[in-house]
Image (cartoon, rainbow, N blue to C red):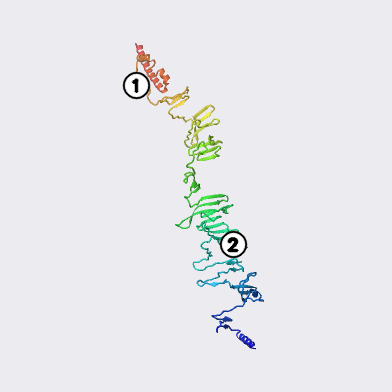
């Protein structure tokens, strides 16, 4: 009877407080709460049960909260802690293993030191596991940008970073690697298991592709295919120079695919002093300057092709000139700084042919041939050398059969021989003072002798000329067997006859003879008068 009265009292009280807040431990319950519990020494105890009992609750309603007292270590696995029912399944709210969120006492954050977080999944594989979603970072603080921070232990030779997976297999990774043998580096790797050396950047700012120990700003490791490819119709590699005075960079040189099939390399239009230089064995070997002049062995060419030094061209297999055209073991053309040589093999001289199939050879300056024996050979039918002035033939040397013709093309032309001595048909040395020696007879229609001096025997007719008497002449002839001032026969045989001088002497005798005849005529006229 007593229990019935208590129940009726509680029922009537609840009915009367149906629209009011109930306070336990307080006389002023919060108006927004149906039940307001207030205490400084006690708490609220949620129904406690085992995992089996929790799952045995018939048709639980969403929001139902219980505390599970035990942990299931076999399937279906569950931890001790708070569980709440959401529509169709129980969800863990908190557990008894200290895997819950705690507010920091010094910072404005909460933390969980022992559990893993799954967003979109109930079985996270790592501390944070996001399934079927994206992670969005935003930082609106002044002077701040979003960051993802990887805190690596002070000394750790393991890889740490980002991994990209599919069905548990690592597809790619971005890892920080501490290596005691090389500089520490960031490694970008692709492909299972995502631990290759596809791309690394070390603490020196050096990039390695296919290697984790680059020895320059960019190093390429072993690769079976093309190390670098540029798939572009006019792909270009540009080399720039920073300009600290005005900022930015200045274009200096480039390598470019041009007109689909051409490779162009060189300096940019603004670089009017740079050269294209090719180097081997740590030495600059070939240079192309800004004027397009090519230097081999020099960086300062002064012609379209400039080779300042090289080997002498000779008949050995060692010295092959500055330039060689040919195999070296067969017929070859060699050039050095003062010689053109043809060899049929390294030790045998060959034949140099110029315009062998026709055409002309024009030499615009003096040509010197310095060789013993046959130095110049013209071979053919009636070979000739024609000499021109401004395109007009003036003279020639022409072989016809057995005859050598030397002449001038114009009727007004002359053959002028400027030499100290000239010999025709003789090898005998000419006496000093003689210009022409002929070993044989000379025939001509007319011969003119022009004396270099003006001494001609007209002096015989002068009033002061001492003409010898006929008796004096007779006496001289009887004693010398020749006329006065006329060479003897032995002198003519020994020294020859000087035509100009003899003509002068003969004219002297003719003029003297004329005076004798005039004198005799006068004597004859006197005798006739008597």
Image coordinates of residue 97 in percent, x first then y, are 58, 71
Residue 454 x/y as whole percent: 38, 25
Front position in the image: 513 or 223 = 223
Give the mark nearer the N terminus: 1 vs 2.
Answer: 2
Q: Which residue is mark 2?
A: 164
Res. 521 image quadrant: top left
The answer to whether residue 312 is above or below residue 526 is below
- Under circle 2, the secondary element is strand
Q: Is residue 510 left or right of residue 326?
A: left
The residue nearer to you, when weighing 334 against 68, is 68
**Above or below, comparing residue 233 to residue 464 in the picture:** below
In three-dimensional space, the C-alpha distance between marks 1 and 2, rounded to whole angstroms, equals: 136 Å
Q: Quadrant of residue 67?
A: bottom right
Tell me where residue 275 appears, x and y as whole percent. 48, 49
Q: In the rendered view, tell whether residue 235 sits above or below residue 403.
A: below
Task: Tell which of 253 and 87 is nearer to you.
Answer: 87
In the image, which is nearer the foreground, mark 1 or mark 2? Answer: 2
In the rendered image, the residue lying farthest to the left is 464
Q: Quadrant of the N terminus?
A: bottom right
Residue displayed at 56% across by 62% down = 162
> Residue at coordinates 37% horizontally, 22% vertically from top-left?
458
26 versus 466 height, above or below: below
Task: Return the x and y of residue 30 as percentages of the image width and height.
Answer: 56, 81
**Residue 462 tag number:** 1
Q: How many marks?
A: 2
| Residue 361 shows up from this direction | no
Residue 13 appears in view: yes
- Give the structural element (helix, strand or loop) at label 1: loop
Alpha-carbon neighbours of circle 2 within 10 Å: few (<14), some, or many (≥20)? some
Within-10-Å neighbours for mark 1: few <14, some 14–19, many 20+: few
Q: Which dot marks residue 51?
A: none
Quarter containing the C terminus: top left
């Amino acid at each position: 009877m007593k229990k019935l009265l208590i129940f009726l009292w509680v029922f009537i009280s609840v009915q009367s407080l149906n629209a009011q807040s109930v306070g336990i431990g307080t006389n002023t319950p919060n108006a927004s709460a149906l039940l307001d519990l207030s205490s400084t020494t006690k708490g609220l105890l949620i129904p406690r049960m085992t995992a089996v009992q929790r799952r045995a609750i018939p048709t639980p309603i969403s929001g139902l909260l219980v505390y599970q007292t035990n942990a299931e270590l076999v399937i279906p696995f569950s931890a001790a802690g708070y569980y709440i029912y959401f529509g169709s399944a129980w969800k863990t709210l908190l557990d008894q293993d200290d895997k819950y969120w705690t507010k920091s006492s010094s910072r404005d954050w909460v933390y969980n030191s022992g559990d893993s977080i799954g967003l979109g999944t109930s079985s996270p594989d790592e501390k944070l596991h996001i399934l079927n979603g994206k992670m969005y970072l935003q930082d609106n603080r002044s002077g701040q940008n979003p960051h993802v921070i990887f805190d690596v232990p002070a000394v750790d030779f393991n890889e740490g970073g980002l991994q990209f997976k599919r069905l548990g297999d690592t597809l790619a990774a971005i890892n920080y690697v501490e290596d005691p043998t090389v500089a520490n580096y960031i490694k970008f790797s692709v492909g299972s298991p995502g631990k290759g050396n596809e791309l690394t950047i070390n603490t020196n700012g050096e990039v390695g592709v296919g290697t984790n120990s680059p020895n320059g700003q960019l190093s390429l490791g072993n690769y079976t295919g093309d190390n670098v490819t540029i798939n572009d119709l006019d792909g270009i590699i540009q080399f720039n120079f920073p300009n600290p005075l005005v900022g930015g960079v200045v274009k200096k040189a480039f390598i470019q695919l041009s007109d689909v099939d051409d490779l162009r390399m060189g300096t940019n239009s603004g670089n009017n002093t740079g050269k294209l230089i090719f180097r081997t064995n740590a030495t600059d070997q070939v240079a192309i300057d800004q004027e397009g002049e090519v230097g081999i062995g020099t960086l300062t060419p002064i012609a379209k092709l400039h080779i300042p030094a090289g080997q002498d061209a000779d008949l050995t297999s060692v010295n092959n000139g500055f330039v060689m055209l040919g195999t070296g073991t067969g017929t070859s053309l060699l050039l050095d700084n003062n010689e053109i040589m043809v060899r049929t093999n390294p030790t045998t001289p060959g034949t140099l042919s110029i315009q062998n199939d026709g055409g002309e050879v024009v030499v615009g300056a003096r040509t010197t041939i310095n060789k013993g024996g046959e130095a110049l050979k013209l071979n053919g039918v009636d070979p000739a050398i024609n000499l021109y002035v401004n395109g007009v033939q003036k003279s020639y040397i022409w072989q016809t059969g057995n005859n050598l013709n030397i002449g001038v093309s114009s009727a007004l032309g002359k053959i002028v021989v400027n030499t100290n001595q000239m010999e025709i048909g003789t090898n005998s040395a000419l006496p000093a003072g003689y210009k022409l020696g002929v070993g044989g007879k000379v025939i001509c229609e007319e011969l003119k002798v022009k004396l270099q001096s003006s001494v001609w025997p007209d002096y015989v007719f002068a009033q002061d000329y001492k003409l010898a008497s006929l008796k004096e002449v007779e006496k001289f002839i009887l004693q010398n067997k020749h006329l006065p001032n006329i060479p003897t026969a032995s002198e003519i045989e020994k020294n020859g006859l000087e035509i100009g001088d003899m003509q002068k002497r003969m004219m002297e005798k003719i003029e003297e003879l004329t005076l004798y005849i005039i004198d005799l005529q006068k004597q004859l006229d006197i005798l006739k008068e008597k």
